[in-house]
Amino acid sequence: MAAEPLRELSAVVRSEWGKAWSVPAAVLWLGIAVVIALVTAMTLANDVVHAVSTGELPPGTRTPVSEVLGPVVSFAQIAVAGFALHLVTPEYAAGSIGPVFLATPRRWMVVAAKTAVAGAVAATLGAVLGPVSALLADVVLGSHAGAPVPVAEASAGAAGVFAAAALVAVGLGFLCRSAVGALSAAFVLLVVTLAAPDTAGRWLPGPAGAAFVSGTADLSRPFALAVLATWSAATLGLAVWTVTRRDA
Amino acid sequence: MIQIEHLTKRYGTTTALRDVTCEVATGSVTGLLGPNGAGKSTLMRVVLGLDHATSGTALVAGRRYATLRRPLHVAGAHLGGLAVHPQRSARQHLLALARSNRIPATRVDEVLDLTGLRGVARRRAGGFSLGMGQRLGLAAALLGDPGTVLLDEPVNGLDTDGVRWIRRLLRRLADDGRTVLISSHLMSEVQLVADRVLVLGKGRLLADLPTADLAARATPEHLAEGMSALESGYLNLVEDSAEYVAGAEYVAGADDATGAGRPASGATVQSGATVQSGVTTQEVRHGR
């Protein structure tokens, strides 16, 4: 019974996957994410080394790599959101959402397919970029490197945060329809919320993402993951609800 | 076959379709006529499930479009404009649509050949002219070899050869036993390709009749001006309706303190200018 909708959905995923890579924006956004991650890792690690050399920090300073990896992932996720949005908002800008909904009138499938593509690419990128960034930070910190981040941990941390950023962005893309609106909303939700006070921050995706990567005392990883999952599900749920009710 | 029953569509306070009931038969080309803002595009969008009906039903091949599986095999449509990511190639655009309906890639190449786009298939669609965009839209509409085809202003932007090609294509589709619905402002085109016409005015269905019967409503004064019989018949039909609707608007407008965007009242009751003026009023008011 469930075979036919599944076949239908996999066809739509294949369609979206091909579309994702058929414009230069895909590689551009992923490239930007890589650059942000590596530059942030290098800069933050170098700041520590520099501060020690100028005497701002004591000579025996040991900075845990996780303290660098947290901001690296938090900043890079906005480019991951950009990648996810390139699957959605240009359809509205170019008017191709019409042909897309004509080909797949079960609109939830279009949202689901774009979510699957964005989530899979984001998680894969995070799984690779997390450990690479951690390694780079470790190398630049040199003798000032504290506890390293195990590869599996760096991988899972960045993969989880990137995937959540992609999912939230897909949802926001369908809700806002405009690239500027959706990217601004994603920036506020994912990055600006990092500045929120702890009491409120624990419920927001920005601080939850940072905690999921670095692991902080007051915000456990399972709790942070639950917060990210809830935001992703809520945004996508609202997107499906809106898209199916709204005129295309 | 397209079956429309008591279809009403409102956008906010604007009523785009009012209780429209009609059928578009298989095996013929049906022209959808009406002034700007009459509801032609809305009718197509609602039939195709892009916009939701406020009330009433629209069925394609006996089912609501939104419930169709692999719908490109049932109905194909092009609603005008270049609805493609400007940086995506024509082939990639069609390939993505084809994949979602499990249509083989060989069919993409077939429709590219059919529409004469093979040579530019790998070029970015952003550089396409209006005519090339039309051809690409047609290629998308024909992708699933559908039994029902809906085209909004299909000859818009096409060169003479393209216009001739599309006439023949529409005729062949109808002769194959398919349902073909085209909207157009060009009476000469409608005269050449359409067997029947549906005429909309201000969201109402004004007429559903054979093309020849509409032409038979021509008046000698129009013909003396050099109009074709179909143009004359059409104008007489929408003129009558517009007078009725414009009168209603005039009364409503009397309460409107600003009177902005309304033509001089004299214009709405004169022949000829009536239709244009009435429509302009609605367009200015509702931005549609």
Image: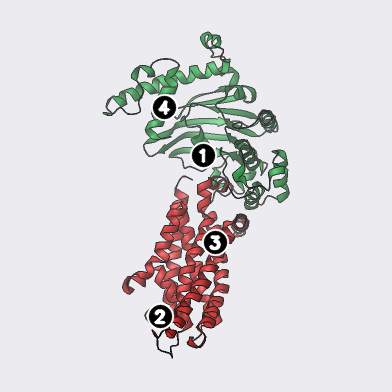
Gap between marks 4 and 3 measured at Cα: 45 Å
Q: In the rendered image, is residue A79 in sight?
A: yes
Q: How many marks?
A: 4
Q: Say which mark, if any, is on residue B45.
A: 1
Residue where numbered disc 3 is placed? A29
Q: Position of residue A34 (x, y in %)?
A: 55, 68
The chain whose colour is red is A
| SS for callout 2 | loop
Gap between marks 1 and 3 measured at Cα: 34 Å
Q: Earlier in the sequence, mark 2 or mark 3?
A: 3
In the rendered image, residues at marks 1 and 3 fall on the same chain = no
Residue A15 in the figure: left or right of residue B283: right
Question: Where A27 sits versus A66, above or below?
Answer: above
Q: Position of residue A99 (x, y in %)?
A: 57, 45
Q: Position of residue A109 (x, y in %)?
A: 54, 55
Gap between marks 4 and 1 measured at Cα: 22 Å
| SS for callout 3 | helix
What is the crowding at mark 1: few (fewer than 14 residues within 10 Å), some, or many (at least 20)? many
Q: Earlier in the sequence, mark 4 or mark 1?
A: 1
Residue at 73% over, 41% down: B113
Residue where numbered disc 4 is placed? B280
Three-letter code for the amino acid on which mark 2 is drawn = Thr
Residue where numbered disc 2 is placed? A216
- Residues marked 2 and 4 touching at CB (< 8 Å): no
Three-letter code for the amino acid on which mark 1 is drawn = Arg
Q: Colour of chain B?
A: green
Please tell me whether mark 2 or mark 1 is closer to you in this view.
2
